[in-house]
């Protein structure tokens, strides 16, 4: 059964590594069968690439469904929305002939990322020195911090301008202290100027409120009418604030539990959870990464896989597929299926490795450590697979794939304990093998 077969109405797509697994490509393909596509966590830190013919779109906040006619795009309450990033993205899409107006809804409960959050994000990274996280500088952590501290500004608050002013002024003041506290001179940083923020927010207020909705109600109505809903995750399990490599994580729950909470529905409405993984692994930003490659091997994967961040342009750190991390990601997400992407990137390799377990303190372990410090000490124990050394990009069925590639994919399926649903063999929509 492929996702969105007749019995599947509501499907969550989640990253099962450190992000950039190809969620955008998969979501775009699945959107063809959906009426509604919902982002449920994260913000403009995401960069989801979708190739449509010769056109490449990089979506940061707007769900990938926007590229499919007739699909409604929603941002759930779990998303932190930077109004200016959203405006830039909407303008960029409109200029390329993609209608956005009238097709997007944002939860009234969604929190806004404000300029002072971005100032704080940058300053706090400076303050962390050698312990920096390598954030995307999009203000994500500080915006979630304000949300959890019950000091954030929600979209629905914009109805009450007096309340909006109080929240923005208090937030900018706290941000100024926070910037000073890490030894950065707040000087005349525009992002800390509440009056300026309010002036700029005032310009977008009506546009934003025009999109205000209850995403939960919309999803429930769509499902009740027999329509299909796709919940599009951002980041990946290993960047999850609880289940990832804390503190080298993002500030949201990136795993499937958030697909319900962050979109406003109950978990029992979700029929399938599709985990997306690369046929190898990449990570961008700091933090432990047991199977990381260095030198020429790393360069080769980075070059063939074009491994540069879709949001920040930073080079991604490549490494071998990690079965220990995969088992963890499958477990915490309750995956019901896996999609393996970028298989083609491995086409020319003579040998391909998978870390089947780690060695720590002289013992072999197959459980993903709970602390980043322990993970840092873990040495991967590899199994070696012979490369297939044939192009796979033109394969359209599983049987057309080289036998060695099939065996490698079956091994990933076994590790994930969930059936293989899709294999991606290139960036285009057509470069896809449904199973
Ligand atoms: P996301 O954040 O999970 O949506 O992934 P990104 O868009 O950040 O990164 C995935 C990159 O790989 C993008 O540049 C995609 O165009 C590209 N891509 C996706 N699937 C494949 C594939 O099967 N093969 C190749 N060569 N590239 C792919
Ligand atoms: P998509 O959705 C890869 C990483 C950052 C950093 C850490 C914290 O495209 O897969 P943040 O700005 O969120 O506070 O940064 O998380 N990160 C991502 N890495 N893909 C992403 O999104 C990411 N979003 C955040 O590099 O290490
Ligand atoms: Mg990405």
Image (cartoon, rainbow, N blue to C red):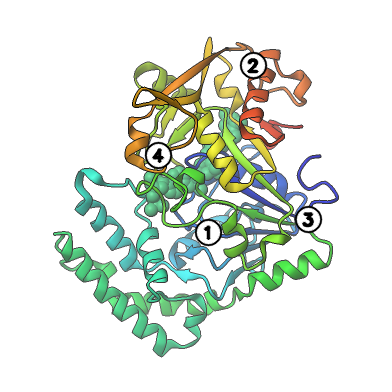
Q: Quadrant of the C terminus?
A: top right
Above or below — where is 33 with respect to 420?
below
Q: Which residue is mark 3?
A: 9
The correct choice, above or below, for 96 with respect to 210 in the image is: above
Asked if 235 appears above or below 21 in the picture, the reply is below
**Earlier-in-chain disc, 4 versus 3:** 3
Query: Residue 300: x percent and y percent?
Result: 44, 19
Tell me how far mark 1 sits from mark 2, CA to CA: 36 Å
Q: Between marks 4 and 3, how big is the CA–CA gap?
A: 33 Å
Q: Which mark is residue 284?
A: 4
Q: Determine whether the residue tagged by mark 4 lies in a helix, strand or loop.
A: loop
Q: Which residue is mark 1?
A: 41
**How crowded is the residue under tag 1: few (<14 C-alpha within 10 Å), some, or many (20+)?**
many
* Residue in the picture at 48% in, 65% down: 81
Instruction: Give whichever of discs 4 and 2 has the lower sequence position.
Output: 4
Is 432 situated above or below 208? above
Secondary element under disc 1, as helix, strand or loop, is loop
Of the image marks 3 and 2, the number of the one nearer the N terminus: 3
Q: Which residue is mark 2?
A: 391
In the picture provided, is 132 more to the left or to the right than 252?
Answer: left
Seen at 24% across and 45% down, the residue is: 131
Q: Quadrant of residue 144?
A: bottom left
Please tell me which of labels 1 and 2 falls first in the chain.
Answer: 1
């Amino acid at each position: 059964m492929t996702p969105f077969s007749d019995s599947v109405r509501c499907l969550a797509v989640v990253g099962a590594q450190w992000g950039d697994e190809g969620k955008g490509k998969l979501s775009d393909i699945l959107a063809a069968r959906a009426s509604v596509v919902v982002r449920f966590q994260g913000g403009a830190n995401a960069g989801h690439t979708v190739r449509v013919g010769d056109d490449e779109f990089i979506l940061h906040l707007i769900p990938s469904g926007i590229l499919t006619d007739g699909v409604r795009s929603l941002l759930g309450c779990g998303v932190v929305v930077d109004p200016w990033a959203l405006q830039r993205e909407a303008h960029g899409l409109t200029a390329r002939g993609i209608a956005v107006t009238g097709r997007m809804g944002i939860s009234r409960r969604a929190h806004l990322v404000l300029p002072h959050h971005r100032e704080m994000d940058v300053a706090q990274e400076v303050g962390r020195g050698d312990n920096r996280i390598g954030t995307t500088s999009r203000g994500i952590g500080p915006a979630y911090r304000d949300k959890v501290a019950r000091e954030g500004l929600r979209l629905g608050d914009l109805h009450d301008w007096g309340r909006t002013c109080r929240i923005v002024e208090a937030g900018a003041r706290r941000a100024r202290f926070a910037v000073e506290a890490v030894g950065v001179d707040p000087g005349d940083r525009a992002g800390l100027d509440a009056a300026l923020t309010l002036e700029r927010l005032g310009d977008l207020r009506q546009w934003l409120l025009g999109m205000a909705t209850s995403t939960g109600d919309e999803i429930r109505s769509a499902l009740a009418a027999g329509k299909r809903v796709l919940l599009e995750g951002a980041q990946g399990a290993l960047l999850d604030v609880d289940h990832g490599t804390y503190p080298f994580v993002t500030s949201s729950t990136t795993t499937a539990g958030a697909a319900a909470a962050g979109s406003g529905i109950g978990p029992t409405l979700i029929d399938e959870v599709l985990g997306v993984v690369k046929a190898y692994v990449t990570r961008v930003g700091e933090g432990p990464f047991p199977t990381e490659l260095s030198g020429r091997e790393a360069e080769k994967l980075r070059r063939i896989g074009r491994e540069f961040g879709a949001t920040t342009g930073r080079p991604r750190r490549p490494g071998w597929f990690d079965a220990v991390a995969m088992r963890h990601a499958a477990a915490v997400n309750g995956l019901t299926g896996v999609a393996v992407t970028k298989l083609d990137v491995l086409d020319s390799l003579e040998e391909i490795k998978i870390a089947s377990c780690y060695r720590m303190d002289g013992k072999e372990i197959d459980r993903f450590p709970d602390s980043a410090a322990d993970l840092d000490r873990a040495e991967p124990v590899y199994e070696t697979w012979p490369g297939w050394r044939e192009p796979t990009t033109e394969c359209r069925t599983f049987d057309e794939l080289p036998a060695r590639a099939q065996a490698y994919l079956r091994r990933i399926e076994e590790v994930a304990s969930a059936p293989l649903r899709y294999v991606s063999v290139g960036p285009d929509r057509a470069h896809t093998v449904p199973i």
